[in-house]
Amino acid sequence: MTPDVRRSQEMDLLAGYHARLVGEGIEGYGFDECLEDYRRALLIGFTYAVQAGGFSNMEHARNAALIHAMATRCEAACLVLGLASMLN
C-alpha cells in the first residue's frame, strides 16, 4: 500500500484482524499486544526489502522500482509508528 492508503486504513484493518481472532476463540490477546506484534512484523518486513535488494539485479528497472517501493513504504510505516524505539 502507499503510505497514504496505509495511514488511512491500517488501524481499521488491524482492529478487524484482531476482532476476527477474538471471534474465532483467541483468548488473552488484547488489541495493544496485537498492535505491538504488528509493529514487530513491520521491522521484519523492512529486512525483506533489504535482503531482496541485495539479491536482485538492480540494473533492471522493474526490480529496482519494486525494491524501492518496498523499502520506502516500509520505512514510512516504521517512522510513523516509532519503531526505532524497539531497536534499543
Image: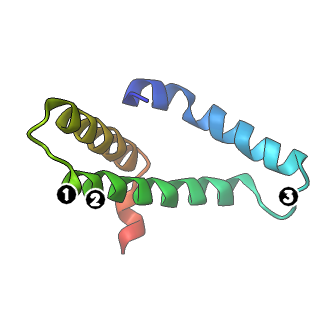
Residue underneath mark 3: 26
Residue underneath mark 2: 51
Q: Quadrant of residue 59?
A: top left
Q: Residues within 10 Å of mark 3 (few under 14, many from 20)?
A: few
Give percent across and percent down for residue 26: 85, 58
Q: Is residue 11 left or right of residue 4?
A: right
Residue 42, above or below 71: below
Foreground: disc 3 or disc 1: 1
Per the model, the C-alpha gap separating discs 3 and 1 is: 38 Å
Residue 19, above or below 37: above
Q: Residue at x 47, y 31 (%)?
A: 7
Q: Is residue 69 left or right of residue 9?
A: left
The C terminus lies in which quarter of the figure?
A: bottom left
Q: Which element is circle 1 on? A: helix
Q: Quadrant of residue 11?
A: top right
Instruction: Give amino acid for label 1.
Output: Gly
Residues at discs 2 and 3 in contact (Cβ within 8 Å) = no
Give percent across and percent down for residue 38: 56, 53
Q: Nearer the viewer, residue 62 or 10?
A: 62
Foreground: disc 2 or disc 3: 2
Residue underneath mark 1: 54
Give percent across and percent down for residue 42: 45, 53
